[in-house]
Amino acid sequence: MSDRVKEVVPDLIYAIRSTLKKHGVTFEEYGAAMQYLIRVQETGEVPLFVDAFFNATIVEIDNVTREGTQADIQGPYYLNSEAYQIISERLPHRPIDENAQDMVIRGQITDTDGNPLAGAELDIWHSTPDGLYSGVHDGIDAKYCRGRVITDAQGRYSVKSKLPVPYQIPNQGPTGELLEQHLGRHSWRPAHIHFWARADGRRDLINQAYFENGEWVGDDCCETDHLDLVVPELIENGARVMEVNFALDPALAIAAE
Ligand code: DHB
Ligand code: FE
C-alpha cells in the first residue's frame, strides 16, 4: 500500500497544484475551499461528497479488466448481507404500496462464454414507489424492496416487485450546494434497480439497471451514464418487465505475495 501511496499521491498533489496555478487561485479562495471541506466533514457528508464525484471513476477503472457485463456504482444503501432473505416470488413491499405499479425483474446469469450459471446468487434492492430506501429512510423496515434470488438450472431468475422512481440524493448540505448552486447541476438519479451478483469461481458484479425513457436517464447526478444498463420498455399484464442479464467474468486470481 505504501508503494501505491508513493506512486499515486504525488501525482494527485501535482494535479491540484497545476489547477490552482492555472486559475490563479487567491488566498481568499483557498480559505473558502478549506472552510467548504470543513463543512463537508462536519455535516457527515464525506462519503456522499466522495461518492458523488469519484465513485463512478473507480468503477470505470475496474471495468477495464472486465470482459463480461460492466459494473456500475454500488451506492450507499446496500446495508449488509443479512438484510437479504431468499425470495422465490416477490420482494416484500409495504402494505401502503399494494396498488403501486407492478414490476417483474428477470433474466439470466451466465459466464463470459454464455454458459448458464445455476445456483448463482443475486441480491436486488431498489427504492420504494415514493423514492425511499428501506433500512435507511423514515424508519422503513429493512426487509422491503430487498431480496436475494437464486438462479435455476438454466441460470435464470424472475421476481416481482413494485416500480421505483427517480431518487434525489441529499441536497440540503454542502455536496448539494456545490452541485446545484455552483456547478449548475441537479441532484437527481434516474429510477434504478441495484444488483449484486455472485457465483462460485466468478468475479462479483455490482450493477444497476435503468428504465428506458425514464426521467434523468442519461443525466444522472452521480455521472454513471456511461455505465448504464438501460432496459427497453416492455409491459406484460400491466407489469413493467425488466430483463437484466449478467455475464460474470472468472474470479480474479489472488496475486502471489
Ligand atoms: C446515492 C443514492 C443512491 O440510491 C444511489 O444509487 C447512488 C448514490 C447517494 O445518495 O449518493
Ligand atoms: Fe440507489
Image (spheres, rainbow, N blue to C red):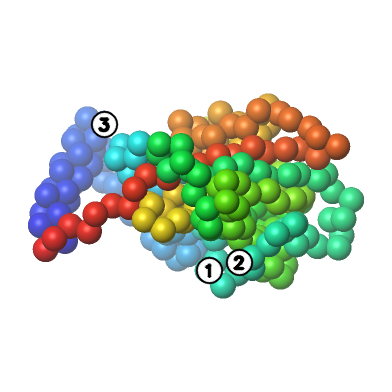
Q: Which residue is mark 2?
A: 84
Above or below residue 235? Residue 42 is: below
**Label 1 neighbour load within 10 Å: few <14, some 14-19, many 20+:** few
Question: How far is the residue under mark 2 from the one under mark 3?
Answer: 49 Å
Answer whether labels 1 and 3 touch (C-beta < 8 Å). Answer: no
31 left or right, relative to 43: left
Q: Which residue is mark 1?
A: 81
Q: Position of residue 76 (x, y in %)?
A: 51, 58
Out of 66 and 98, give the one closest to the viewer.
66
Question: How far is the residue under mark 1 from the one under mark 2?
Answer: 6 Å
Answer whether labels 2 and 3 touch (C-beta < 8 Å). Answer: no
What secondary structure is found at the residue carrying circle 1?
Answer: helix
What secondary structure is found at the residue carrying circle 3?
Answer: loop
Amino acid carrying mark 2 in the image? Tyr
Q: Which residue is mark 3?
A: 23
Quadrant of the image for the N terminus?
bottom left
For marks 2 and 3 on the same chain, the one whose residue lies earlier in the sequence: 3
Q: Position of residue 172 (x, y in %)?
A: 59, 53
Which residue occupies 57% across, 51% down? 153
Quadrant of the image for the C terminus?
bottom left
Which residue occupies 76% across, 37% down? 240
Out of 175 and 122, give the one closest to the viewer.
122
Badge number at residue 21:
none
| Camera-nearest label, 1 or 3 | 1
29 left or right, relative to 109: left
Q: Kindly indicate the quadrant of the structure image that contains residue 25.
A: top left
